[in-house]
Image (cartoon, rainbow, N blue to C red):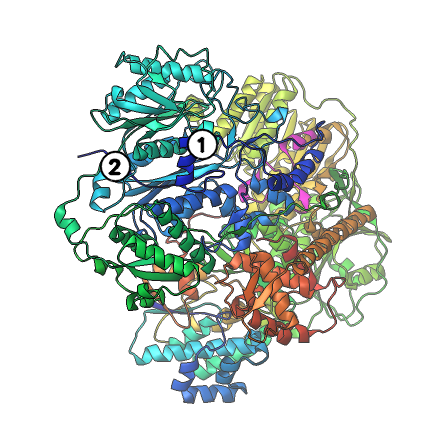
Amino acid sequence: MHCLVFPGQGVQRKGMGEELFERYPRETAAAAELLGHSVADLCRDDPGDRLSDTRYAQPAVFLVNALAWRDLEREGRRYDYFAGHSLGEFNALVAAGVLDLMDGLALVRHRAELMAGITHGAMVAVVGPDPARVEATLHRAGLNLVHVANHNSDQQVTVAGDRPQLALAVKALRGQGARILPVRVSGPFHTPLMASAGRAFAAVLRGYEFRAGHTPVMSSVTGTEFAPDRAVQLLSRQIHRPVEWVRAVRALRAAGVDRFDEVNGTTLTTFIARIAAQPTEERI
Amino acid sequence: MTTDIAVVGLSVEVPDAPDQHAFWDVVRTGRSLTRPFPAQRRREVEEYLRYHWESALVPDAEDRVEFHDGSFLDRVDLFDHAFFGMTPKQAAVTDPHQRLVLRTMYRALEDAGYTGERLAGSRTGVYVGYAGNPGWSYLEYFCRVDPALGQLGITGNIVTMLANRLSYLFDLRGPSMVIDSACSASLLALHQARAALLLGDCETAVVAGTRIVLAPVRHPHTRIGIESSDGVTRTFDEGADGTGFGEGSGAVVLKRLDRALADGDQVYAVVKGSAVNHDGRSEMMTAPDAGAQADLLESAWRNAGVDPRTIGYLEVHGTATRVGDPVEFEGLRRAFAARTDDRRFCAVGTVKANIGHLFEGSGVMGVIKAALALRNRVIPPLANYARPNSAIDLDGGPVYVPREARAWPEGDGPRRAGVSAFGLGGTNAHVVLEEFVAAPEEPAESGTDRPPYLFTLSAQSPASLGRLVTRYREAIDDGRIDGSVRDVCWTSNVSRAGHRHRLAYTVDGLAGLRAALAATEAGEVPDAARTDAARDWAGGSALDLRAQYGGQRPRTVHLPPYEFDETRAWIDFPETWRDRFAPAAPQVEHPLTHEVDFAPAPLARDGAPSARVLALVGPAAADTVAAALPPDAVLRAPGDADTEPDRLAEELVDEGYTHLVYAPAFDEEPAADPAELDRRVDEHLIGLFRLARALMHASAGVDLVVLTRRALAVVPGEPGAVPEHAALAGLAKAVGREYPYVTVRLLDIDDAVPAELLRTEILAAQAGVYALRGKDKYRESFAELPEIPAVRDTYLRPGGAYLITGGLGGIGLETARHFAAGAPGIHLYLLGRTGLPPRAEWDAIAADPQHPAAARVTAVRGMTSLGATVHPVAADVADEAALADVLAAIRAAHGRVDGIVHAAGVPGENLIAYRDAAGFASVLRPKLRGAFLLHHLTRDDRPDFVLHMSSVAAVFPALGQADYAAANLYLDHLARTLDTPEHRVVSVDWVSWREVGMAVAAGTHEDLAFRSLRTRTGLDLIDAALRGDRAGFFAGEVNYTSDLMSVLPTYPVALSPDIEDKIEKGLAALAERTRRNVARVREAVESTEVRLTGRPDGAYTDRERLVGRCLAHVLGHPTIDVHADFRDLGADSIMALTIGNSISACLGRPFDTVDLMSERTVAAVGRLIEAKYDTAVPGESEGDDHGDDDAWLDELLTTPGD
């Protein structure tokens, strides 16, 4: 079985989607009207480094992901599952017929506004130690404002939170032999520090319709199939809960998926290649 | 099938002899290269050695630095980093041995005619004889200069990289390894390579050895015992007193002879056979053994299938020691004697007399010497040989010592030689070589030789190419190029054509080639040779050079080696080291123990006037709470339908409540039985857990006020306490930690607290654990406890019976062993849920270290040997019936339980938000219920002591430890309630133990905010706890040298002023260190000189210069093109982080390394800095500001290199 996966914020780069915007002028124009700015111009010129601003980055990635899927759809490609990493989950829902493209974009715009509203946070990628050990180290160090934010692969998690505590976390994790790389996001995404944004987003979500869809979507929050009737809870929690990408991929494999395709880069398939068939080590 | 192995290429470099011709000249003329340690190298290491000695714990009496004489290279600091794909900085932190041997191995492969495409992907093996010996290492040296260089220098200083880097650089797929058997290593490497060729592990093999003596210090403590007094090696001479140091490197390239001939390779000599053995348990480990050496020679001869009488020359090991030389002579005398009585037919010598001893590298040098002797058909003299050693009977033996070079006479068969090398540890190797006699060329083949041919030469830099032209011209002039013009051109095509800078001539003879080379040297155009083909190829066209030979089979011939374009690659030792390496301030001792108590606290002055309060109040608390709440407060009784946690939480948010008061637990008396305890835990404690989780799920932001009545013992022994409710305080603290949007306070009151006062305290914005007693207020506090006075000498009774719950866990076993050693003949009942396998299986288990119970069985046996009787018991401490049975059994056997250690427990493992009630309860069970049962079931025994193993989590709960914190706080207050002088109940809050226990299992036993405890220290503290008279204390030292101490003030626990002060000072000291580091980075970057290129007008912006300097500082390039991609300059992601840190330091504000990775050129990053960083917040540049961003920056800078 085949699954198509959609990446989230972080894959944006200047020049992204250039041909797609030309190929889909109608969607591109509609998006510009909804957003009040042209994503095509934004991706081409990146004025004032706006692509690193969550408010602009999320709708841009969403639109490019969605148009890339349009390409595949036109070619007649069919998938047995869709899944997305964080923001990419909205693309998965659009592809699966749960959401309209423009509803998805409107939601992503709200989401981006709410998430960008929580600042003073940062995120780093931690490469090396077992994820359980990363978490144990953060906890035992007495830190309470940093959390594991993404379980990306067997060797990589991201840790996000309050900047001063994140600096302490980096020190403690390096003591464990981890390699630390900065990740360019503006807030402590996917941690309890985002709870208020999650709550506000729930109110937004209640105004939208989530259809049953024609293809299952694997949730990156729960690692189970996305239940449209629980959409409000799942998508609002997604903001302040860790991205359980490893769990989602394992669930997809357990469901029989043996091939993963990705739009807009190879970030997720690279992670997937580093997720072992079975958990190598249980939590202690 | 033949087992002959051909030496198809070689390269050698020793002082004064940079190539094989010069080396052979040294050997042939019998010169000795011994000289003083070169002045420049002397200067480079002298200061460092002084520093080294002065910084020693015991300063050395010697203050003069004296060096041995020896055969030293003039320079070991030069390297062509670009040729070997390194940045200048990487090269400068690469072990000079690696650089030297790389150069030599490359030249050997080139000499064999194999480089570039002819080599890439081939099954070529690399075998290097080498050892990282004790003493002065380059890594240690430059890490002292700058520890941050360690990371960059990793691959340059790992020993195996000596071989592996060559394989990596040239894509060689055969085995690649470093072999160490001391002084026989590189000969053993040859033996191994030969075996690999014969086995088919590889098709070609490079064998190399190298040796550099970085600091040949003459010092009594560093003598090995074989050093010559004057650095001169006098093997077999009466004046021999040891071997001199030698430096250099040598490499040979081997192939199977049949393959070599088929491939048209040149053959220096043929390896006929080899052997390796060990002295075994000889007289002394480091002394040679004649018998083993004789056996070795015999094996090698047999392996080679040669008659020893045909050996004309023997390259002996010959370390020129009083012991070694006669032993070696005796060995070869015996070996020959077994086969022949002939005398004085075999010449002996050793290259050590010429070039000194290269230790691990010496064997291959002997092979090169012997191969060149065979090729030149000359028996070389033994250098420094004047008077025969009187301990050796040369005349009566098979060998003689040649004093001058002489032609090697032809015998019945081919000329043969042997080479020996013996390792200090007893591993001996011997190789048998034979001259190669080429078969006469087939006439048909030579008939097709139709010049002219295209001669090609190339190099990685113009300077290298220029020097190569001269070397080739000189080689022709000196008659050192032997072969037809066809073979010379062919060799130049297949092994000299792969580099970027090229020239080519069409030539029909060596004279024509010489003329073309000379013209090029003179800057003229050699018109005749510049054909179209030559111009095209030199211009970069891809021509099939082999096509010009048609069906011919040209041969590889020896040509001059590559000329490297070398620059200095060395980390200088700072002359200012005396200032920079000032001794650190003396370490201050901090107390190991702390007290957790309740300190008087000021009453709150006013609460929130517009509070909207919702209260969950149990019946017992209803009156008290109602009186204290604002009139509009909403009261509900727990268990009512409208108190379901999730609904309640939604309601709190939707209705805009500001305070949630939780007061279910106002019991008058402690629980009388386990059932009542369970009820209270379930209703009150797990009730609070559910409520907190619901608040989190609803993203509620309220003040959570937990009210209890006499749950805490404000002072030990305070009457009327109900300690199970103290667990609520542990949970309350954890909730506040895990969910920063609620402010959590626990107010523990007595009946004398006035309602008005209580209202103010309920509504006041305060976090933490407070006790109100009448009109007095106390707050949980943490203070230093310098000592715990002992009031009794011992707490164990000889022959006593002791119960340890969790006794088969890590800390439980250590405690049990400590007890076993503390009093004679005691009985230890070690309780664990899984127990131990039956005693009958113990022998087998103890013998199998992989068995999961092996360590436990061994520990238990250790206690038995101390005189204790150990009773492992499989029982759950929280199981009332099982525990009662155990206690009954102890009473039946001993009359009484003399003491109890409650060490059972499982760690908390998840955040409240993700935890279910069953998981939460499972952590409470062993600790909380277990402790209750232990006291409940021994209330009539009154043991001498009950020791609670509590945790740091009771005071400073970590995330994910809500359940664990609650249970441990109960243990603490239970002890404060029950402790009496006759029946000690002591609770110790342990920080992580370093060597055993839960933290080790979780991998978090390093020093964090507290230093982890050594087992020995932990056991001493158990003694202190049970000999003293405190109901408890906190066992752990604050780690005042770590930034992590800054988490302590973020807990709602009152730190004593002295601790606050120490933390403040400690953080200031760390900040100062960071500031110094930043300043140092900035200083180093600013003093880095770099020339920017890439713009015709030569105009560069300040930001470009800054980025250029940062880049040059990390990568070492003297010039940088502003449009060059960082990755092409050699930067990887780790270096990028270091470069980013340098840019941050210079900008005085955090620079995002991601920007470096996305922009990738000096020009682009310079522009980005102007656009993004310089405009954002102008004026904020110096490091005084310690806001969020600076902390982040500081963090990355204080640990550079990651």
| Residue nearest the viewer, comparing B484 with B61 | B484
Is the residue marked by circle 1 packed among few (<14), some (14-19), or many (20+) residues within 10 Å? many
Does the segment drawn in magenta span residue B1002? yes
| Residue nearest the viewer, comparing B122 with A118 | B122
Inter-mark Cα distance, 1 to 2: 25 Å
Give above or below for B231 relative to B9. above
What's under tag 2, amino acid-wise?
A: Leu
Q: Are marks 1 and 2 in contact (CB under 8 Å)?
A: no
Is residue A161 at least partly visible in the picture? Answer: no
Chain to which mark 1 belongs = B
Compared across the picture, whether B1197 is left or right of B299 comes to right
In x, y percent, where is residue A80? 32, 69
Chain to which mark 2 belongs = B
Question: Can you tell which of label 1 and label 2 is closer to the viewer?
Answer: 1
| Residue nearest the viewer, comparing B6 with B999 | B6
Q: Residue at x 20, y 40 (%)?
A: B258
Which residue position holds label 1? B360
Give above or below for B621 relative to B985. below
Q: Secondary structure at mark 2?
A: helix
What's under tag 1, amino acid-wise?
A: Glu
Q: How many marks are shown on the rendered structure? A: 2
Is residue B137 at least partly visible in the picture? Answer: yes
Determine if marks 1 and 2 fall on one subunit: yes
Q: Earlier in the sequence, mark 1 or mark 2?
A: 2
Is the residue marked by circle 2 packed among few (<14), some (14-19), or many (20+) residues within 10 Å? few
Compared across the picture, whether A78 is left or right of B444 comes to right
In x, y percent, where is residue A224? 42, 63
Write down the quadrant of residue B540 in the picture.
bottom left
Q: Specify the segment rendered in magenta.
A: B992-1020
Q: Secondary structure at mark 1?
A: helix
Which residue position holds label 2? B199
Does the segment drawn in magenta span residue B197? no
